[in-house]
Amino acid sequence: MRALMVVLATVTLVGRASAQRAASLSPTVREVVSVDAPVVALTHVRVIDGTGGPIANDQTVVIANGRIQAVGRTGAVQVPGAARVLDLSGHTVFPGFVGMHDHIVYETTNRIVSLGFSAPRLYFASGVTTIKTTGAADPYGEINIKREIDQGRSPGPRMHLAGPHITGGRPWDLGNPGNRVLWMRHVSTPEEARRVVDYWADEGATFFKVYTDISRRELAAVIDQAHKRGLKVSGHLCSVTFREAVALGIDLLEHGLTANTDYHPRKVPDVCPPDRAAGLAELDLTSEAVKATFRDMMAKGVGMTSNLAGAELAANLAPMDERVVVALSPETLAEALAARANIAATQAEARQLFKQRVRYEMEFVKAGGLLMGASDPNGLNLPGFGDQREFELLVQAGLTPAQVVQIMSANGAKVLGVLDSLGTVTQGKLADLIVIQGDPATNPADIKRITIVFKDGVGYDSAKLIASVRGLVGVR
Ligand SMILES: [Zn+2]
């Protein structure tokens, strides 16, 4: 029986490896392919492999049939005679990023748009080769996009779907154009919660997302039903605290400090306090209360998603990225800039909260916690560009570049259950790789200088992908 299983596993791996050779891709996808050969050798590259290990200089990475066939010192690694050799002196190779809170839905003050065309292209162009959508406004759109990408008809990352957000309460204030809870699923009994999980599990969701107004009773039902189906649950919480959710068996916590009501001075069970950030600006991040949260999370293996690019933007600390100006539709850009101008009034408070949020994540990593990266796009924080900014912010916060690459790739892959097949630059894994001109380890901003993104060993032209969405972000 075991021998048969091994044979079957081998057959599956081979089948998958050859599933997306460029020849089988649609003309639309081939338009953005820049490297297409059965065997490719990237020579003289600096490799940060995603394991957290040391940076390796002058490496050669051999890609064959969609997989990493060899990695090692240039000259010591044998390059097959048939290989297409790319001399990439001065370049760095990372594993493809795994964006753990990477929506297709995009919000500004007055609009909620499903970016079915531009978001997958921007994630992919930015080196994010796998995303977890973490809540959809257009769940069927996402199911269809995933299918188009997987079948080679549209360029984009591997997608792990969440279905719609699941929350409690009711969709208040229908007149508010920025009403984000209007498109969520509001459950009010455990039976209803189980039914919703079953429905979306049947439709293809694999990692559910609960939102700020769910109560403990319904959350417990969501988690139990998802686990029965072998699926996972993450939360952007408020009504339920981190420690409560961990005790109920949640798999992942989104957003870090500002979504955690463990420290709220007047917390009432099952209620999201209107002043949810009360006390956070002064919270002692080395206190016993914080340690208790981290201890609980680690005891149950629960990780935390960072999305500092969005937090930085909310504090009006983000530098302007010229690529954003070009990618946004003029109307959306005007709206996002106006929103930014409005932040000025609360800036001092927001800045302090941003600092605290960064420190909370640093304490979590120091304690041994599993942190992962994302962009959670909104306003001037665009799909993919936000993941790159996250890389920069985590390096600036004091983590080593090797640690940050691990956070952005392997940690997410681990939580998605795909670390055995991707997430690090390791022999035998799928060739999902980012080629960067420059050295992001010494100059983090170089992360924006991606030239080629490999998925399944096919190389895609990052610049062409970005150019293809010019003026469209905020529209489609
Ligand atoms: Zn979100």
Image (spheres, rainbow, N blue to C red):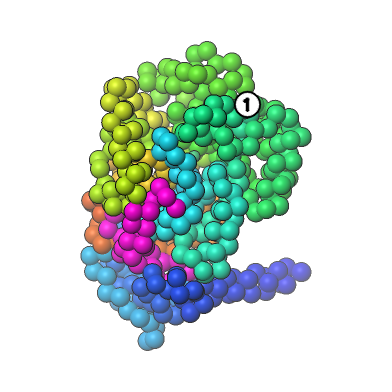
Horizontal side of residue 10 vs 436, given as left or right: right
Q: Is residue 35 visible?
A: yes
Q: Residue at x 51, y 29 (%)?
A: 175
Q: Does the magenta segment cover residue 237?
A: no
Pinpoint residue 383: horizontal percent, then vertical percent: 40, 49
Q: Nearer the viewer, residue 38 or 349?
A: 349
The answer to which quarter of the image holds residue 81 is bottom left
Residue 311 lies in quadrant: top left
Q: Residue at x 41, y 38 (%)?
A: 108
Residue 102 picture location, percent across and down = 47, 47
Q: Image quadrant of residue 54? A: bottom left
Left or right: 70 in relation to 400: right
Q: Amino acid at mark 1?
A: Gly
Q: Nearer the viewer, residue 219 or 372?
A: 219
**Picture layout, residue 449 above or below residue 189:** below
List the residue tagged with mark 1. 169
Q: Residues within 10 Å of mark 1 (few under 14, many from 20)?
A: some
Residue that extends furthest to the bottom in the rendered view of this protein: 81
Asked whether mark 1 lies closer than 8 Å to ligand 1, one says no
Residue range highlighted in magenta: 447-476
Above/below status of 245 relative to 57: above
Q: Residue at x 31, y 40 (%)?
A: 334
Residue 402 is at least partly visible in this image: no
Q: In the picture shown, does residue 169 fall above or below 98? A: above
Q: Is residue 423 left or right of residue 32?
A: right
**x 30%, y 75%: residue:** 86
Looking at the picture, tell me which residue is in the foreground, 73 or 187. Answer: 187
Q: Position of residue 41 (x, y in %)?
A: 36, 76
335 vs 190, left or right, is left
Q: Secondary structure at mark 1?
A: loop
